[in-house]
Amino acid sequence: GNFHDEDDGDSTLKNRDESGTSSGGGGNGIGGANNNNSGGAGDDVNEPSSISFRESSARYERKLITELGSLLRNRAIGATLVELSRASCLMAAFRSALKIVHPSSGTRKNDKELLAMDVDILMTGLKVAQEEQLRATARILADDLKEPMPVPFGKSEFRYTKQENGSGIPDEEIRGFPFGLADLKNQPNIDKTLNELDAGRDIRRRSIYHSSPFDDRTTFKFSNSVPLIIRSIHARAIAFAAFALSQEELGQVFASKKGGGIAGYVLDCVEQCIVLAAMGMKDNNEQVVITDREAVQIMANIFALQSALPRLFGVIMRGLCHLGMVKGDEVEESFEYADQTLTRAEKACDKQVDSVYMTFSRICRNRINELLRYSLDNFQWVARTTRDSPNTYCESLMEYLRDVFKCLRQLELKARAALYFLICGHVSEKLVAITFGKQSEDSAEKNESNDGLYTISKIDAFGLKNLSIDVKALETFADGTGVPQLRDCFSELRYLTDAILDRDLPMLLNLDKENARRRKYPFLKLEMIANILEKYQVSGGGLGGKLLGSSGNDQDFLILEKKELSNLLRLVKSQI
C-alpha cells in the first residue's frame, strides 16, 4: 500500500534484467561471430540477427515498463499524497531518461499509458488530499490550548519589518506566523475601557487578571492551532501541485477545466482543504460541552484562517506561475478562477463562523437566564425604600457581561459589535418580560414560554425606582464599551420605567393627551402599563403613602394611591 522498496519486487526486476542481459549477450556474440566471417554469406546471416535483437530489446523494454506501471498502480492504492507525488516525480524522471536513451524506440508511443496510475488519478489525489487535511486538522486541534496564543518576544523568534505604505511589496513573512497572522493581535484599549467600568471589583482579582501571561497586550487573537493548520494547507497544496505537474509531464491529458487547465485543479485542492479545515475547527468540539470563551476562540480561529487566505492564494499563484503551470494564454483566466476560489473559501469560513455564532449566542442566553433565575429567586420587588446603587442581580449581570465582552476582544469589530447587541438585547428582553410581562394564571406555562423565568406578581413605586437605577447602570455600562448606540438595547425598559414613575402619567393617559404622550414616550406600550398597574402595590396607602413619597430624594417620582391606581388601570384598559 506504499512506495517503499520491497525485496520481492527488486529480485523480480533483477531476474528479468539478468535474463534480458544474457539474451542480449548471446545476440552480440552471434553478431560478433558473423562479423568475423568474410564474404556475402556473412552479411546475409547478420541482417536477421539485428532485427531479432531490436525486437527482443523492444519486447524487454515494454515488459519492464509494463511491470513498473503495474507495480505503481498496485502501490498507489492507499498511498499518501506525498507518496503519490514522489512516485509520479520518479516516473516522470524515468520516462525522460528513456526518451534520451532510446528516443526512437516504438515503446515511446504508448509508454505513458503503461506508466499511468489511473485515468482519473488527479481526482484520486484530490480525494487523498482532502482526507489527509481532515485528519491533520483533527490531530492539530487535539493539542489546541483553546486560548489566545502568546506573542513571542525573542528577536530570533519574531522578526518583523514593516514595508512603506504604497510600496506594493507584501510585508515580510514571519517565521511561525505566515500570511499576515503576525498582525492579528488583541487590542488593549478594549479591556481598558471595560476596566474603567469596573471600579467596584476586587483589586486582587484585577491584579491577577493583568498579570496573566495571556494578557491582551501580549497575545494574538488566535490559538496555537491556527498557524499549524495554515501551514498544513500550504504543504498539501505544494504536494498536490508537484503531483499534478509530474502527471502532466508523464503525458497525462486532463479534462478541460475552466480556470486555466491544471492550475485550476491545484486551486480546487486548496479550496477543499480550507473548507475542511474550517469545518474541523467548528466540529471538533461538537461532542463536548464548550464554554462561551471556547466558542469565541473557535470563531476567532476561523476569522484568523479567513484573514490569511488572500496572501496564501497569492503565494500559491506565484508558485504556479514559476512552475509553468499557468500557461501564457491562460493567465487572466487562471487569476479570475483564483479570485472565484478565494471567494468561495471565504464564504465557507463565514458559514462555519455563523454556526459557531449561533452556538455562542445560545450559551450566553442560557447563562443569562440561569443567572437571572437564581438572582431573582425570592427577590423582593416591594422594596418600600430606594437604593443608591443597582440591585444585586444587576451587579451580577454586569459582572457576567464584563467577562464575556473581554473575551470578545479577539473578534473583529463587526462581529464583536453584533454580539454586544445580541447579549444586551437579550438582557433587556428578559427584564421587560419579568417585570412588565402579563402574569399568567398557569405559572408552569409561563415558566416554559419565558425560558424558565417567572413574571413578578407584586411591585411598588420604590421597586420601580430601583429598577430605573438598574436600567441607568446598564446604559452606562453599554456606553463604556465604546460601541455606538448599544445603550438603545435598553430603550424599551427605560421608557417603561420612566413612564410609570412620571408624575405626569395620569394626565398623559387621558384620551385628549395621546399626542403629547406619543411625543414624550414614542415607544410606550399601553399593554405593558396595564400589566404593571395590575401588579402595583400601594405603599402604605392614603396619607402614609404620600408622606413616604415626599420624603428625602423620592419626591421626583410618582406614588399612586389606591383610588388613583384603580382609575388609571380602568383608563388604560379602555384604550387597549
Image (cartoon, rainbow, N blue to C red):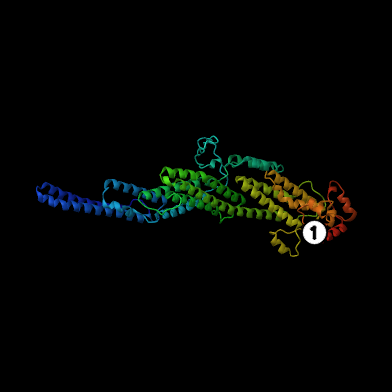
Q: Residue furthest front?
A: 329
Identify the amino acid type marked 1: Ala
Q: Is residue 426 visible?
A: yes
Q: Is residue 510 visible?
A: no
Crowding at dot 1, Cα within 10 Å, few <14 / some 14-19 / many 20+, comes out as many
- x and y, in percent, of residue 325 in the image: 41, 46
- x and y, in percent, of residue 463 in the image: 79, 53
- x and y, in percent, of residue 450 in the image: 70, 59
- x and y, in percent, of residue 295 in the image: 59, 51
Q: Residue furthest left?
A: 39
- Is 541 left or right of 173, judged from the image as shown? right
- Is 435 left or right of 260, judged from the image as shown? right
Q: 516 or 404, which is in the foreground?
A: 516
Image quadrant in which you'd find residue 507: bottom right
* Helix, strand or loop at mark 1: helix
Q: Residue furthest bottom?
A: 442
> The N terminus lies in which quarter of the figure?
bottom left
Task: List the residue tagged with mark 1.
Answer: 530
When the figure is inspected, residue 211 is found, relative to residue 73, above or below; the finding is above
- Residue sitting at 79 percent across and 53 percent down? 518
Image quadrant in which you'd find residue 148: top right
- Residue sitting at 73 percent across and 45 percent down? 476
- Is 421 left or right of 150, judged from the image as shown? right
> The C terminus lies in which quarter of the figure?
bottom right
Q: Residue furthest right?
A: 543
